[in-house]
Amino acid sequence: MDKPVPIKRTQNDAIVLRSGFMTGIIAKVISKVIEKQGYSAKVSLHELTMTHADDDGNVHVHLDLYLDASEKDIRKLINQL
């Protein structure tokens, strides 16, 4: 049996999500992750872009989102980063 040929990535490989359905699902997942951390926040995702950066498998992710939370919760979230 032949070995599978590895996929060679280029910088042109990208995923861009803008549809309301898909961004809505991802926003709900992000909201649930934030809630599991003990914070209250509303998340609205406008766009998600993922691009392969190099041959090592690294990926650049860009999120265009709106987060509505208390100042206290946002400070705690930022400190966790």
Image (cartoon, grey):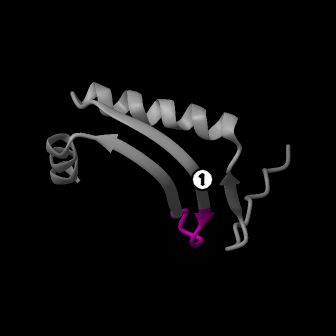
| Residue at the image point whose x is 39% and y is 27% from the top | 32
| Residue at the image point whose x is 74% and y is 60% from the top | 7
Q: Nearer the viewer, residue 54 or 14?
A: 14
Q: Position of residue 73 (x, y in %)?
A: 19, 40
Q: Does the stretch in magenta take in 53?
A: yes
Q: Nearer the viewer, residue 56 or 51?
A: 51
The amino acid type, in three-letter code, at marker 1 is: Glu
| Residue 5 picture quarter | bottom right
| Residue at the image point whose x is 57% and y is 50% from the top | 46
- Read off the residue under disc 1: 47
| Residue at the image point whose x is 43% and y is 36% from the top | 30
| Magenta-tinted stretch | 51-58
Which quarter of the image is occupied by the N terminus? top right
| Residue 49 picture quarter | bottom right
Q: Does the stretch in magenta take in 28?
A: no
Badge 1 density bin: few <14, some 14–19, many ≥20, Cα 10 Å: some
Q: Is residue 14 above or below residue 1?
A: below
Could you say whether the residue bearing mark 1 is in a helix, strand or loop? strand
Q: Which residue in the rendered view is the most extreme toward the right?
A: 1
Q: Nearer the viewer, residue 14 or 6?
A: 14
Q: Position of residue 24 (x, y in %)?
A: 59, 34
